[in-house]
Amino acid sequence: MDIFSDEYFMRMALQEAQKAFDEDEVPVGALVVSQNRVIARAHNLTEALNDVTAHAEMQAITAAANTIGGKYLKDCTLYVTLEPCPMCAGALAWAQIGKIVFGSDDEKRGYQAKAAGVLHPKTEIVKGVLQEECADLIKRFFAQKRR
């Protein structure tokens, strides 16, 4: 069994999402991996930074580009707990990310419903990794907000 599976890295992304949850941010976590090495970790910071663009994916893209010293992430994989929104999908297209692995679908705001075809044509997509765990964290966050 390969220790560096999609589930292995998605569990790390879930740890980032939990940090967001604990900071009263929408609990989305992301990480960028290159050659089985985590080069960026991030979670939503929209409330802390008062910035609507401070999504986990945007933070991870910036951190990864700084780590590798270049703007293209062709040989990297983004692991994110929630399907990227159109803004993040557009940024991932510009970064030419090699692969995106996400946990839970976002039927209302995800790129699949709002901006299908926006990703770079060579980007590989893997959906539904640890889907239940990823969806549960989001559901618990919004249930808590409604109380």
Image (cartoon, grey):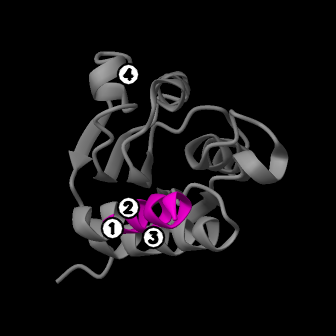
Return the residue at label 1: 136
Return the residue at label 4: 120
Can residue 128 be seen here? The reply is: yes
Amino acid type of the residue that numbered disc 3 sits on in the rendered structure: Leu
The crowding category of the residue bearing disc 1, from other C-alpha atoms within 10 Å (few below 14, some 14 to 19, many at least 20), is few
* N-term-proximal mark, 4 vs 3: 3
The crowding category of the residue bearing disc 2, from other C-alpha atoms within 10 Å (few below 14, some 14 to 19, many at least 20), is few
Question: Image check: 88 left or right of 25?
Answer: left
Amino acid type of the residue that numbered disc 1 sits on in the rendered structure: Asp
Q: Pick whichever, 103 or 122, lies toward us.
A: 103
Residue at (35%, 19%) from the top-left corner? Answer: 114
Return the residue at label 3: 14
**Residue 136 image position (x, y, % from top left):** 33, 67
Whether pointer 1 and pointer 2 mark residues with C-beta atoms closer than 8 Å, the reply is yes
Is residue 114 one of those drawn in magenta? no
The crowding category of the residue bearing disc 3, from other C-alpha atoms within 10 Å (few below 14, some 14 to 19, many at least 20), is many
Return the residue at label 2: 139
Q: Which of marks 4 and 1 is in front?
A: 1
* N-term-proximal mark, 4 vs 1: 4
Whether pointer 2 and pointer 4 mark residues with C-beta atoms closer than 8 Å, the reply is no
Residue at (68%, 36%) from the top-left corner? Answer: 70
